[in-house]
Structure formats: C-alpha cells, structure tokens
Amino acid sequence: MITRKELIEKYLHFFKSKDHKEIPNSSLIPINDPTVLFTTAGMHPLVPYLSGQPHPLGKRLVNIQKCIRTGDIEQVGDSTHHTFFEMLGNWSLGDYWKDSAISYTFQFHTKILKIPLERYAVSVFIGDKDSVKDEESAKIWLSLGISKERIAFLPKKDNWWGPTGESGPCGPDTEMFYWTGKEKAPKIFDPKDKNWVEIGNDVLIQYEKTKDNLFIPLKQKNIDFGGGLERTLAVLNNFEDNYLTEIWQPIIKEIETISHKKYEDYKKEMRIIADHLKTSVFILGDEQPTIPANIGQGYVLRRLIRRAIRYGKILKIEINFTKIIAEKVIEIYKDYETLTKNKELILKEIEKEETKFRTTVERGIRKFEKLANEQKEISGIDAFLLFQSFGFPIEMTEEMCKEREIKIDKIGFDKEYLNHQELSRTTSAGIFKSGLSDHSEKTTRLHTTTHLLNEALSRVLGPEVAQRGSNITQERTRFDFVFSRKLTESEIKELEDIVNKVVKKSLTVKSEELPYKEAISSGAKGEFGHKYPSVVTVYTVVDKDEKKEYFSREICTGPHVKNTSEIGRIKIIEQSSVSAGVRRIKAIVED
C-alpha cells in the first residue's frame, strides 16, 4: 500500500531531481482574480508567469495544489469524481518542451510509481482549423514504448486546455490513462471505456487566443502537468474506487456508523456526503475562510453542506452529523495547518448551517412532494418559494425534479430570483468574461492602487491593519483587511487624500526579486496567512521624501504601472463587513 504522504514525497523528490523548485500551496480563493470563484488547478496562481513574467524561483516549478471544481458536481457519486482534490503539478516556463515533458511524466509513472506498461495508454490532439494534428507528441510516446494501438487521437473537447476566459494562453494536451479493470487490458485503447481512468495531463501551452478567435503562437511555450492525487493513489493501490483509499475510508466508516448502513449498499449517497463535507471543511478552513452565504463562494459552500444533509436524510441520519464528519477530515489532513488553526470556525459554522437547514428541510421536502404530486412541472414561482422559504438551492430542486422525472421552469426561477435580488448569472457560475490573464490598462492601474490603499490604511487606522484578500476587476478593486469597526467619513476622506497625493507626486514603481526573508526584513508587506515561495517579487513605490525612501513596499505577482501618475484619481465607493473583525472597501479609479 502506498499512502498519500508517500505519493507526495515521491512526486516532489522526482521533479526536484530534475531541477524543479517547489512553490507553496496557494489559497483556494484566487488572489486578485475575479474570473473564477475557486482555485481550479495548480496553474491558476501561475498565470502571470505563463504569460511571460519571470518567476522568482526560475523556469522549472513543482507543487501539490489544493483545488475545487464545481462543474462536475452532478458526477460526484461515482468512483472517481470529486469537488475538492489535490493536484500534482509541474511546470516549464519557456524552458523544456514536449520531449522532456512527456519523458518526465512517463519516467515518473513507470519508473518511480512502477505502473506497468500493459495498463498504460495515452491520448493526443487530433488537430483542427486552429492547430495541426499533434504527430510530434505521438512520436515521442512511440519512442518510449507505447504501442500505436494505445495512442488515441482526440478532438479539442477532449485534448485541449484553455483559455479559461475569452482570451489567453492555451494549447493542445496529451493525457495519460490507467486500466482499472480486473480483466487484462485490451490491446486497443478505447477512451470511451470507463475502465481507462485519466491519471495525468501534459498541457502544451503554445498559443495565445485573441478575443477575435485567432490562435497566435506564443514566444514563450509552457508545459503544465496536472495529475489528480486521489485517482493516482487509488490506481497505485489497485482500487477501482477512489473512496477505498486511506484519505476517504475514515470518513466513509464514520458515515456507516452514524447511518447504521453499509457503504456497499449506499455508495452514491455516502460518496456525495463524504465529498461535499470534505470540500466544505477546506473552504471554511482556507487561508481566506469563507462562511455560508447566498452569493459567491459562500453560496457554493451552502449548496454543498445542504446537499450533503439531503443525502443524509436519504440515509435516515436524524442527528446533526456534519460536525462529526468535519472532525474526521481535519484529522486526515493534519499537514494543512490552516485546518487545525481554523478548526473552531469550521465546526461552528458547519453545525450552524446544518441546524439552520434542518429546521426547514422537512417542511420543504413535504412542500415539494405536494407540488410534484399535483402538477407535471415545478413553476418558476414555486421553485423560488422553495429557495426563499425553505432554503433549497435551485440545483437541489432541479435534482429532485430529475429524480421524479418532472420538469422545472428554470427560466421562470431566474426571473423571480433576479427580481428579488440583483445578482448576475455569473455569481453562481463563478466565471467572468475577462479571462484569467486580464492585464488590461484599467486592471493594472487598480493593482497598484490596491498597494497604495493597503499602506494608507495602516497609516490612518494603525499598524494592526492586515490584508485578508483582494479582488480586482476592470471596474474596481475590492480589499479585505483586519479591523474591528466601520470607518468614519473623515477616515475614508483621509485614505483618498493620501493615495491621491501619491498619484500626483508621479512616483516610480520598481520591481525586484528577493529571498522571502530578505523581502520581509526590508519592510515589504505580505498578505496575512498567505504562503510565499523562497524567492518573491517585491514592488516598491519609491518616495525619497519618506524616511524609508518609499511609500509602500509589497510582495506581489503584478501587473503594475511604472509610475503612479498613470493611475488617475481614486475614489472609495463602498465599505462593508465581511465577517467578525474583517472589513471590506471597494475603490475605483477615475481618468
């Protein structure tokens, strides 16, 4: 048996032996990125470097990144899909290309993990009007000993990555599969056969897609490998079911105990409960904790907890059980210090959400059953009633309709929802059109504005102010910080005056790469709770009038203006409370 810890150690050791530098595990809430609600892949925090910005640690990187994907939530319940997962990732930023990338992956799989060749297959891009057939990757696989019959050429929907928005870096990929069937693997690789499970993916980032749908070759070609830890751990231990591994079994056994039922008889229900509550624990226990809410990350969290409770009702679990499961998750992942640190918050919020939902869920289910028995379709008004009065996320009502084989007026629900609360469709989808690599002029100006605001807050409110996160779009910057009360109008005006004075002084913005410890000792600010690599990029707003000869000095990945005069006049348009002891301000720049 190979453990999660051993797999992680083997992976990091192998790629470090190939001159890759380990980078820290990033927050599940993307920093300065409005395009998605959660970190969906290891490459997510690396987008500026994929676009050409030099990384402080060099061109070869490796890490294990915690990720959340909600796009496959309906598939959770089978043996391989999860909303939360850990990704094995390694990157080449303009260094090695296809030959080395594929060879490294193959060596790791077959030499280090001892995966037998007879259980191994790959897929490559078949080509289309945007890019040629990837014969090059196929030839490399053949040279490594993969037979022609085990190489499948697949279209863009299967073997292409990105961009995540309308534009940005993208390219074909080549994927690796493991045969999980009990019988001998067939000679010919059939990607539609579910016994073939994907365990890795080398993305060959070689194009920049424009908003006009043109694919322009990149000057800097990048490699982005991603491999699901959960799937890899399962196949290495000869499990066809991911939930039989050590990172799931303590949770499954706990569900069996509290439900008085066996996993063999209720696999789907127990998998969904285990998956959703594990994901919930990581959202609550992140470096930037999120609590249940009706928008954004909080909405996803609420939906996951409530869906787990609903499946708990199917298992006839009558007690509050989410807190019990949460403790098991924290126990399994002791290496994540933020879970232990936030344990009290995790247990309190998850139980509070369960108690709140349980008070109405039975009445809500009875109301749904009554409606379903009386009509062939759940109207938009009725679906909104279930949402507003009984706390049913629309996805839960949709799922119940699917089980009863009746229709639901989703368009009608959306209309009712938008009439009640001005929320865009993208709030729950979590995707904005701007794309991950939004380095527009307006966004760049707002990035530097955020640094100036951070420093100004410390000067106006005191040194106890600490950054807890930021989010920047082309329209505004949003900045969260540790502070106990609402800001006064005079404090808001003082903040604006300080920043606008710096803008008028036309100060130079300098960037430099420094060892992390040296950066901190030199006065550079870092984000509260954020993990940084050993070498970081520091942006300094140079001001010789200051005693320290700079106005602000901060660790960041950019992008930034060269001079503060480029920013324009800033105005704070809103302030609010995020949670106990954490405030939020929003600011815009005016030309």
Image (tube, helix red, strand yellow):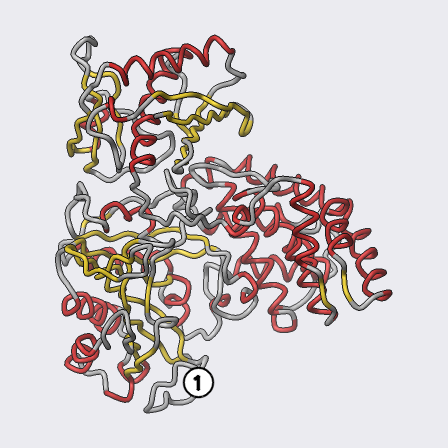
Using residue 411 as the reference point, say whether residue 241 is left or right of it. Answer: left
On the image, the x and y values in percent for residue 184 come to 38, 89
**Which image quarter is the C terminus in?**
top left
Above-or-below relation of 349 to 117 = above
Which of these two is toward me, 454 or 219?
A: 219
Using residue 159 as the reference point, say whether residue 316 is left or right of it. Answer: right
Quadrant assignment, res 418: top right
Using residue 107 as the reference point, say whether residue 2 is left or right of it. Answer: right
User: At x 54% / y 70%, what residue is drawn?
Assistant: 78
**Which image quarter is the N terminus in?**
bottom left
Q: Residues within 10 Å of mark 1 (few under 14, many from 20)?
A: few
User: At x 46% / y 50%, what residue is drawn?
Assistant: 431
Q: Residue furthest bottom?
A: 187
Which of these two is toward me, 409 or 387?
A: 409
Asked which secondary structure carries label 1, the reply is loop
Quadrant assignment, res 164: bottom left
Above-or-below relation of 279 to 542 = below
On the image, the x and y values in percent for residue 97 come to 15, 64
On the image, the x and y values in percent for residue 116 come to 28, 80
Q: How many marks?
A: 1
On the image, the x and y values in percent for residue 42 come to 33, 53
Above-or-below relation of 337 to 266 = above
Above-or-below relation of 182 to 267 = below
Identify which amino acid the numbered label 1 is placed on: Lys
Q: Disc 1 designates what residue?
A: 182
Which of these two is toward me, 549 or 280?
A: 549
